[in-house]
Image: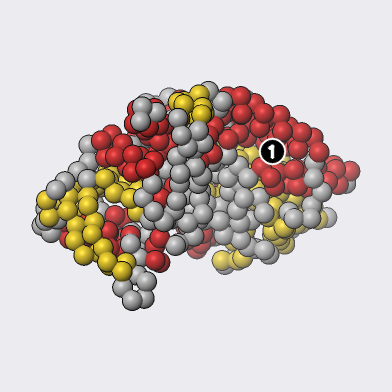
Amino acid sequence: MEEKIFLYYTNDLHSHFENLPQIIGHFNEEKEVRERNGQSYWLIDIGDHVDRSHPIAEAMKGKANVQLMNDAGYHLATLGNNEGITLDHEDLFHLYDQADFQLLCANLISIDGVQPDWLKPVSYATTENGVRIGFIGLTAPFNDFYNLLGWSVANPFSIMEKYLPELAEQADIIVFLSHLGITDDEEIARRYPQIDVIIGGHTHHLFRDGEYINETLLTAAGKHGKFVGEVILTWDQEQRKLIRKEAYASSTDNLPKDEETEQKLIAYQNRANDLLGETVTTLEKPLEFGWFKETFIMKQLVETLKEWTGAECAMLNAGLLLDRFEKGDVTYGDIHRICPHPINPCLVTLQGDELLEVIRASFTKQFTELKLKGFGFRGEIIGRMVFAGASVTTSKLADGQERVDYVEVNGSPLDMDKPYKVATADTFTFGRLLPGIAKAENKQFFMPEFLRDLLADTLRKKVASK
């Protein structure tokens, strides 16, 4: 006799609630079929369901996301970095207090030794016909950030080796819920063939029909709820083993919408508007924005960043502000709408020659016109770099590029051999956007403050009085 086992999953929703009614509608249809046929199924989330760039997630610190997951009937979830490092310790500690599903993250550790009641490393479930499934969850170890918030994330490979013997002994099937990213998922599949399925996320990769490394099935459903994932496992009762593994990721574009979820989202949005409606300051005139110029508000924000971090100079990209501030009352909701990014201030130490290369790179068209997605940035394009404490003289070349001719820091010529403390957005410490910053050995991150918290201070202290 054969038994089919169904796993339905989401990953990296990032609070893109516009796609949630379709996801829930699909889940509801599938649940009805499975229950009618007496088949076992589980609903799973692979992390980054919460993203504070959305006002609902911002206003309720992710708890509305958890309630929506409860209402959908999720059984299991793991933790993403957007839950882990965009909430302060207390908010994360209590995020899943009311969760009806089990949160699995075997490598998250509270530094004070007090673990949340909802946090478990592994979980076991049994199908209708007695097949035992072991689940384990792991998240990406961004300890430069987690440590500042009172958490530590252990090496995922060490943790996997710790729990795999237990899982192999107690379960017929092992499923890994991974918020590590595709590279680590592939390496884990190579190292640990006893894992049957890896459901992945974090790097927003999409496997429409699954991928195999040896006998391990890897699957992932992209990002933002544009796809929903399904795994079908076929177990042979006589042979006592899996005889078939299938994985699919289906577009949510044409899936039926769940009307009840749509109504809940409207109610949550109204609630968020109320919570974010407090007036921060009142403006006597509007404040313009522009992605390719130095506006008054951007200049003041960079000045605030320099002062707040104690830097010698500071730099931020104008694309951080998505709209202008209108005359009149400015609410926190306005600030969140105009600067929605979960980006923290950062202080790096650069030698003068390194700083010069960073400044030169920031003036290239390839940089300023880049349509950036990820690294905390939730805007359209990077835009022009705006400086405080540094004066940059440029000239235009025949091809339209801008050349950096001369740089001063606090009135003195840039000293190529001198170390400078430079404040910027933590975005630039990742990837290859500005390699000089990403490679800097000395980085100091400021948490849990976002750049929009500094923007609020700027509006209160530097702009309202003008």
Can the viewer see residue 448 in this picture?
A: no
Location of residue 96 in the rendering, given as x and y in whole percent from the top left corner: 57, 29
Is 453 above or below relative to 351? above
Residue in the picture at 31% in, 55% down: 438
Q: Residues within 10 Å of mark 1 (few under 14, many from 20)?
A: many
For the residue pair 415 and 428, the one nearer the viewer reads as 415
The answer to which image quadrant residue 63 occupies is top right
Quarter of the N terminus within the rendering: bottom right
Residue 9: percent from the left, percent from the top? 67, 48
Three-letter amino acid code of the residue under disc 1 = Tyr
State the residue position of label 1: 74
- Tell me the residue at 49%/42% (across/down): 324
Count of all numbered marks drawn on residues in the image? 1
The kind of secondary structure element at disc 1 is: loop
Tell me: 97 left or right of 399.
right
**Residue 21's x, y, as percent?**
75, 43
Compare residues 181 and 137 and report the one nearer the observer.
Answer: 181
Q: Residue furthest toward the right?
A: 36
Classify residue 391 as left or right of residue 39: left
Write the residue at 73% across / 54% down: 252
Which image quarter holds the C terminus? top left
234 with respect to 123 (left or right): right
Q: Residue furthest front?
A: 285
Among the 4 quarters of the image, the one containing residue 65: top right
Q: Residue at x 56, y 56 (%)?
A: 204
278 shown above or below 450: above
Does the rendering let one see residue 285? yes
What colouring style does the render use? secondary structure
Question: Which percent across, then down, holds residue 460?
Answer: 39, 27
